[in-house]
């Protein structure tokens, strides 16, 4: 945080200079700078003790093993009987590790096996062994100057390759305490430059800049989501001890040998909200964050209630209204292009709502507006017997302070302005902004269910990229060059694996919080009295 105390008149020009440096990394010959950057990065990587990183430096022609030097495990048996395709040996021909190409089969890397040709995390607890291939010396400079953000950018730009990013992230999470102690020059440089980067919303590189600013169409999301178009964590049905399935309690871990569809798991989650809020036919439900209308449609189909749903996306509004009309529910569901802060006094809010539901929208509120959000919930929910249910991705308490002061790949490239609160932070705001009148009924962490979901989304995204996503990008942005499209693809692949590793290791959580007013007797319906 070297520059964090300097006035804006100093930090703004420095921040602009920082962005110029980030954009120039890949195009310069660094010479003496590389002589400092490379050994510094290697000194940090040498702190790996759990698991193994095999580092192949193509420009230097070297191979370095860091951490535990144990062999890659033998190929595991496949979960499916489908014959695998033609796996390509090596990470682009390096060291005999197979890399997936489209729907081609993959198995045997880092104790993982394949489903439809994509890496699947191992269910055992052996330390990960991962191979990283450095394609360009720009990689060392990016990581030296910008740490984890530099690694993300190097991957997006093809300066480094990894056949199993999920296991790579798990490796670093397992060794985080050893590698992030702030004692190395890498930590000092990256923290200083990160503090500058937080003063600006501009992106660092021409390719990164262009790919990050293109609007993403409904067609792209449809290419990897399930048919219901629910873009949030589902609840998978868990296996019982006898191999059957427990449909009444789907909140345990999912072990992968079941053939339940993602759509089934999403419907289970939506039903959890409808049942948790005890939605009735006479209720007027407010949904904050429409998505593509799956919750509103499901709630009305099941209960006959009325739903007013808020979104800030014109594309989502158009498609959700089409889906609602196709379901014959246009008379029961109203989708408004409106910010939640503007709803009070709007004709759609003639009276407080009986129930409020918000699914993974809180992450977009921002730290500075959490109090405002829950103050609005307090105003919009009826005072006698109202019930609200929220779902939100969360950051663990122990990492929350450092996270709040920094910037990561997700809030820079995927959800600009996004913020993951802690559970304590959410509960404190709920209590304070409602003057204690919103009583917490339950807090349930379903984050473990996200890992499988993110893997399935990634598989569909990659499988459909050439046939669906690339043409959609070209159609909407005719000037988008092939290298820009490749950066876009790698950015989203990185995003899916980055998040998957976070949920697998419980570095991230995803909670469902149910609150009710005094007099919410419906919350007692499932309890023997």
Image (spheres, rainbow, N blue to C red):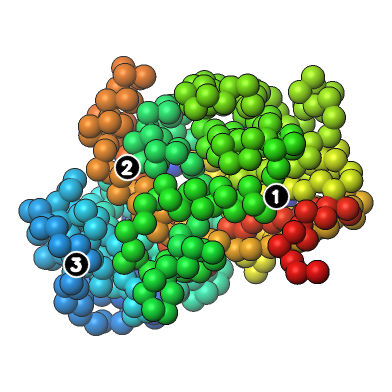
Residues at marks 3 and 1, CA–CA distance in whole angstroms: 41 Å
Residue placed under numbered mark 3 in the picture: 78
Residues at marks 3 and 2, CA–CA distance in whole angstroms: 22 Å
Residue placed under numbered mark 2 in the picture: 461
- Image location (x, y in percent) of residue 264: 43, 50
- Image location (x, y in percent) of residue 323: 48, 26
Decide which of tag 3 and tag 2 comes sooner along the chain: 3
Q: Is residue 315 visible?
A: no
Q: On the rendered structure, is 305 left or right of 73?
A: right
Quadrant where the C terminus is found in the figure? bottom right
- Image location (x, y in percent) of residue 448: 49, 64
| Element type where label 3 sits in the image | loop
| Element type where label 1 sits in the image | loop
Residue drawn at x 64%, y 52% as measured from the top left: 275
Decide which of tag 3 and tag 1 comes sooner along the chain: 3
Q: Callout 1 environment at 10 Å: few (<14), some (14 to 19), or many (20+)?
A: many
Q: Residue furthest right?
A: 435
In this rendering, the label closer to the viewer, 2 or 1:
1
Residue drawn at x 64%, y 26% as measured from the top left: 332
Is residue 342 shown above or below 42? Answer: above
Q: Callout 2 environment at 10 Å: few (<14), some (14 to 19), or many (20+)?
A: many
- How many marks can you see? 3
Is residue 422 shown above or below 244? Answer: above
- Check if mark 2's residue and mark 1's residue have beta carbons within 8 Å: no
- Image location (x, y in percent) of residue 192: 58, 53
Q: On the rendered structure, is 241 left or right of 374?
A: left
Residue placed under numbered mark 1 in the picture: 277
Name which quarter of the figure residue 201 lies in. Answer: top right
| Element type where label 2 sits in the image | helix
Is residue 464 shown above or below 126? Answer: above
Q: Callout 3 environment at 10 Å: few (<14), some (14 to 19), or many (20+)?
A: some
Quadrant where the N terminus is found in the figure? bottom right
């Amino acid at each position: 945080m070297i520059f964090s105390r300097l006035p804006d008149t100093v930090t703004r020009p420095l921040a602009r200079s920082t962005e110029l440096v980030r954009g120039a990394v890949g195009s310069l010959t660094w010479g003496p700078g590389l002589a400092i950057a490379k050994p510094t990065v290697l000194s940090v990587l040498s702190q790996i003790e759990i698991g193994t990183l095999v580092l192949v430096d193509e420009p230097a022609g070297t191979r370095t093993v860091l951490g535990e030097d144990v062999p890659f495990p033998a190929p595991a048996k496949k979960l499916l009987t489908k014959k695998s395709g033609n796996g390509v040996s090596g990470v682009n021909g390096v060291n005999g590790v197979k890399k997936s190409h489209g729907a081609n089969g993959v198995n045997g890397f880092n104790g993982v096996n394949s489903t439809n040709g994509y890496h699947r995390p191992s269910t055992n607890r052996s330390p990960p062994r991962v191979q990283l291939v450095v394609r360009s010396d720009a990689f060392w400079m990016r990581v030296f100057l910008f740490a984890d953000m530099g690694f993300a950018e190097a991957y997006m730009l093809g300066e480094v390759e990894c056949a199993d990013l999920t296991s790579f992230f798990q490796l670093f999470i397992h060794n985080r305490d050893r590698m992030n102690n702030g004692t190395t020059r890498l930590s000092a440089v990256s923290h200083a430059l990160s503090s500058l980067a937080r003063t600006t919303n501009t992106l660092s590189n021409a390719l990164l800049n262009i790919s990050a600013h293109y609007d993403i169409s409904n067609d792209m999301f449809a290419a990897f989501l399930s048919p219901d178009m629910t873009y949030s964590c589902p609840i998978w049905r868990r296996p019982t001890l006898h191999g059957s399935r427990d449909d009444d309690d789907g909140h345990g871990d999912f072990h992968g040998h079941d053939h339940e569809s993602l759509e089934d798991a999403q419907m289970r989650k939506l039903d959890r909200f409808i049942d948790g809020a005890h939605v009735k036919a006479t209720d007027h439900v407010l949904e904050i964050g429409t998505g593509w209308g799956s919750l509103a449609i499901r709630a009305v189909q099941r209960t006959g209630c009325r739903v007013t749903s808020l979104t800030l996306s014109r594309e989502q509004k158009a498609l959700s209204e089409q889906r609602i009309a196709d379901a014959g529910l246009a008379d029961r569901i109203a989708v408004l292009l409106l910010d939640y802060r503007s709803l009070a006094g709007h004709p759609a809010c003639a009276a407080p709502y009986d129930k409020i539901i918000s699914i993974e929208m809180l992450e977009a509120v921002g730290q500075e507006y959490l109090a405002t959000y829950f103050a609005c919930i307090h105003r919009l929910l009826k005072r006698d017997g109202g019930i609200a249910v929220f779902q939100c991705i969360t950051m663990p308490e122990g990492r929350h302070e450092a996270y709040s002061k920094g910037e990561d790949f997700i809030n820079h490239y995927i959800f600009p302005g996004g913020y993951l609160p802690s559970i304590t932070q959410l509960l404190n705001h709920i209590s304070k902004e409602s003057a204690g009148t919103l009583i917490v009924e339950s807090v349930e962490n379903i984050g473990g269910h996200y890992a499988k979901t993110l893997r399935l989304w990634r598989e569909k995204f990659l499988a459909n990229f050439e046939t669906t996503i690339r043409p959609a990008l070209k159609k909407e942005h005719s000037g988008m060059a092939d290298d820009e499209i490749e950066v876009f693809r790698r950015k989203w692949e990185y995003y899916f694996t980055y998040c998957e590793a976070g949920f697998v290791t419980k570095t991230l959580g995803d909670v469902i919080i149910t609150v009710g007013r005094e007099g919410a007797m419906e919350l007692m319906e499932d309890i023997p009295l």
